[in-house]
Image: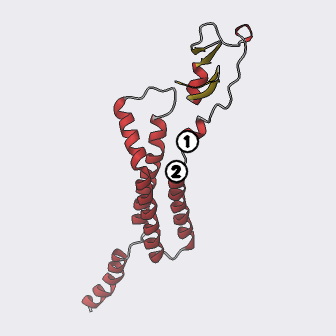
Amino acid sequence: MKSIIATVAAQPLRSAVTHRRPGRMFLICFFLCFLVAAAALVYPVYVIRPFRHQAPRELMIALAIWRYRPFVMILCALTSFAAIAWYWARETRWQRRAWSAAGVLAVSAIALLSRVNIYEIMFHPAGKPSFSAIDQSKLDGDEKVIAVSIGTEARAYPIRIISYHHVINDIVDGVPLVATY
């Protein structure tokens, strides 16, 4: 009699141990994918931002991440999709399924954002430059410029403008010119 009661009492405990909820494994996989994708998105932008000193080693790491980021993002997105497929096969509660889907969408959104070249947005082309005479100029007296004199025309391109746009296309005395800094 005691052995039958012990066997019956042990069975629910044994089934509770072997049938754990799948949420923990999914969360670990999701957070790893999310952290790797977020780091691959943010670190190069943090290091390569303008008007900031970049150490050679951190710049080398940022450029390596930039180079391999598409493959990392695809791997993160595919892993998160595989994790949600595994999770949904084991989870029946719709609230948890909805939260898991939101998490996978977040990883996918980060992967899509990594395809946007933020520097093309930040450093849009300068357009056609406009010039004024020296006495009408609004530049400070000690402001640095790139000065060009060709034939009878002269131009001064302020460094603070060029450092934002990086490239100024112009024609000076009929000669095409690119001023860059």
**Front residue (pair 149, 59):** 149
Q: Residue at x 63, y 7 (%)?
A: 141
**Front residue (pair 38, 111):** 111
Q: Residue at x 46, y 61 (%)?
A: 77
* Residue that badge 2 annotates: 115
160 lies left or right of 5: right
53 lies left or right of 101: left
**Front residue (pair 90, 50):** 50
Asked if residue 31 shows in the view, the reply is no
**Front residue (pair 141, 126):** 126
**For residue 33, above or below residue 163:** below
Splitting the image into 4 quarters, where does residue 171 fall?
Answer: top right
The count of marks equals 2
- Alpha-carbon span between mark 2 and mark 1: 9 Å
- Estimate the x, y position of residue 147 in percent, counting from the top left: 58, 14
Q: Residue at x 46, y 66 (%)?
A: 81
**For residue 15, above or below residue 46:** below
Question: Helix or strand or loop: what does disc 1 sit on?
Answer: helix
- Estimate the x, y position of residue 55 in percent, counting from the top left: 38, 28
Q: Are marks 2 and 1 in contact (CB under 8 Å)?
A: no
Splitting the image into 4 quarters, where does residue 9 fall?
Answer: bottom left
- Estimate the x, y position of residue 168 in percent, counting from the top left: 60, 27
**Residue type at tag 2:** Arg
- Image quadrant holding the N terminus, namely bottom left
Question: Helix or strand or loop: what does disc 2 sit on?
Answer: loop
Task: Find residue 118 and name its label.
Answer: 1
